[in-house]
Amino acid sequence: MDTTNLQLSPEQRQALQAHPGEPLHIQDEKTRKVYVLVEQGAIPELEEEYIRQGLEMARDQIARGEVSETSIVEVIDKAQRLQTTKS
């Protein structure tokens, strides 16, 4: 299937217009998977904003004393195990 000619539904277009510049989350009712629709060229900006928000959240947690002795290797291992169980 050629995906370059897919068209937006009226509902998708309306949602995009209501929140310009933001990603649109679309859930497939059959698989329950969520897909993200973004304007072409916007991904680097979204990634930068995601990282900025994550760093801000981390600074706030540190300021509140919410720290952990968990190593980065342990965090990565846990994330990989979670990803494996989801697949």
Image (cartoon, grey):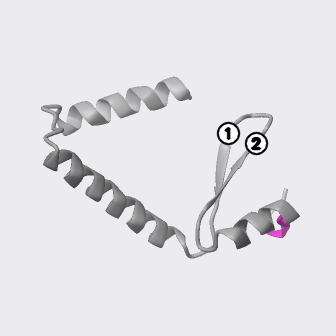
Going 17% across and 31% down the picture, which residue do you hit? 70
Q: Residue 36: give x, y in percent of width and height.
A: 63, 55
User: Is 74 in front, or is 9?
Assistant: 9
- In the rendered structure, the answer to whether residue 78 lies left or right of residue 61 reads right
The residue that label 1 is drawn on is 33
Q: Are marks 1 and 2 in contact (CB under 8 Å)?
A: yes
* Image quarter hosting the C terminus: top right
Mark 1: secondary structure: loop
- From which residue to which does the magenta span run? 4-8
The quadrant holding residue 6 is bottom right
Q: Amino acid at mark 1?
A: Lys
- In the rendered structure, the answer to whether residue 17 lies left or right of residue 61 reads right
Going 79% across and 38% down the picture, which residue do you hit? 29
The residue that label 2 is drawn on is 28
Residue 54 in view in this figure: yes
- In the rendered structure, the answer to whether residue 68 lies left or right of residue 14 reads left
Compute the Cα span from label 1 to label 2: 5 Å
Work out whether 18 lies above or below 11: below
Q: Amino acid at mark 2?
A: Asp
Q: Residue 73: give x, y in percent of width and height.
A: 22, 35
Mark 2: secondary structure: loop
Going 54% across and 73% down the picture, which residue do you hit? 42
> Which numbered dot is residue 51?
none
* Image quarter hosting the N terminus: bottom right
Q: Residue 46: give x, y in percent of width and height.
A: 48, 66
Q: Residue 44: give x, y in percent of width and height.
A: 46, 71
Pointer 2: residues within 10 angstroms few (<14), some, or many (20+)? Answer: few
Q: Of label 1 and label 2, which has the lower sequence position?
A: 2
Residue 9 in view in this figure: no
